Image (cartoon, rainbow, N blue to C red):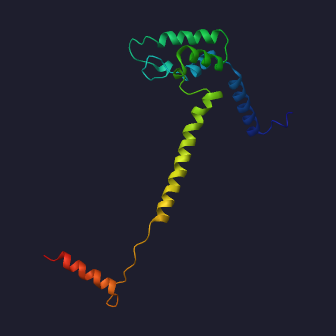
Amino acid sequence: MRKLFANPWLRAATLCLVVVLVMGASSDPTARFNNIGHKMMCVCSCGQILLECNHVGCPDSARMINELRDQLTSGGTDTSIFNWFAAKYGPTVLAAPIRGGFDTVAWVVPIALFLLATIGTAFVVRAWRQRSTPAPALVAGPGNPAADALRERIRRETEY
């Protein structure tokens, strides 16, 4: 075992791994409160994240923050807390829809519409290019009667 940790790089990598695992395993209630609070919107129509609602005299943010604390102390999961708030205040309380069920449509439809619009635009442009007919090339020179006739017409129409 002593030989295994003789390399200083291996010791540093092991220490970093242990620190990351310990930090990830800790269940800090403040971090969870901040995480959930930043995924919800204040319902006072200010358009701000719940924990960042800063307008003076907000009638809703303090109450909602207290309800969030109550939900966290009752031991609910993140999904159950989001569902509770969505049931009470409507789905607009969530900053982003919960993945799963019908809310997946809110994630998929915008991307699908963008891709379909891009593909449709490419087909329309391709169809326009195929439908357009190129103008006949007029070779300039004294031996081309079409070019001579066009040149003479231009001279007549531009004289004054």
Q: Residue furthest right?
A: 1
Of 43 and 15, which appears nearest the observer?
43
Residue 82, compared with residue 21, is above or below; it is: above
In the figure, residue 58 lies in which quadrant? top left
Would you say 87 lies left or right of 130 here? Answer: right
Q: Position of residue 73 (x, y in %)?
A: 64, 9
In the figure, residue 30 lies in which quadrant? top right
Quadrant in which the C terminus appears: bottom left
Give me the residue at 55% from left, 19% from top: 37
Quadrant in which the N terminus appears: top right
Would you say 150 lies left or right of 113 here? Answer: left
Q: Position of residue 34 (x, y in %)?
A: 57, 20
Viewer can see residue 100: no
Give me the residue at 69% from left, 29% from top: 20
Q: Position of residue 59 (x, y in %)?
A: 43, 10
In the figure, residue 148 lies in which quadrant? bottom left
Q: Residue furthest left?
A: 160
Would you say 68 lies left or right of 49 here? Answer: right
Of 24 and 67, which appears nearest the observer?
67
Give me the residue at 73% from left, 32% from top: 17
Give me the residue at 69% from left, 20% from top: 26
Count of residue discs? 0
Viewer can see residue 102: yes
Of 47 and 103, which appears nearest the observer?
103
Q: Position of residue 146 (x, y in %)?
A: 33, 83
Of 88 and 71, which appears nearest the observer?
88
Q: Residue furthest bottom?
A: 143
Residue 99, compared with residue 63, is above or below; it is: below
Would you say 96 lies left or right of 75 here? Answer: left
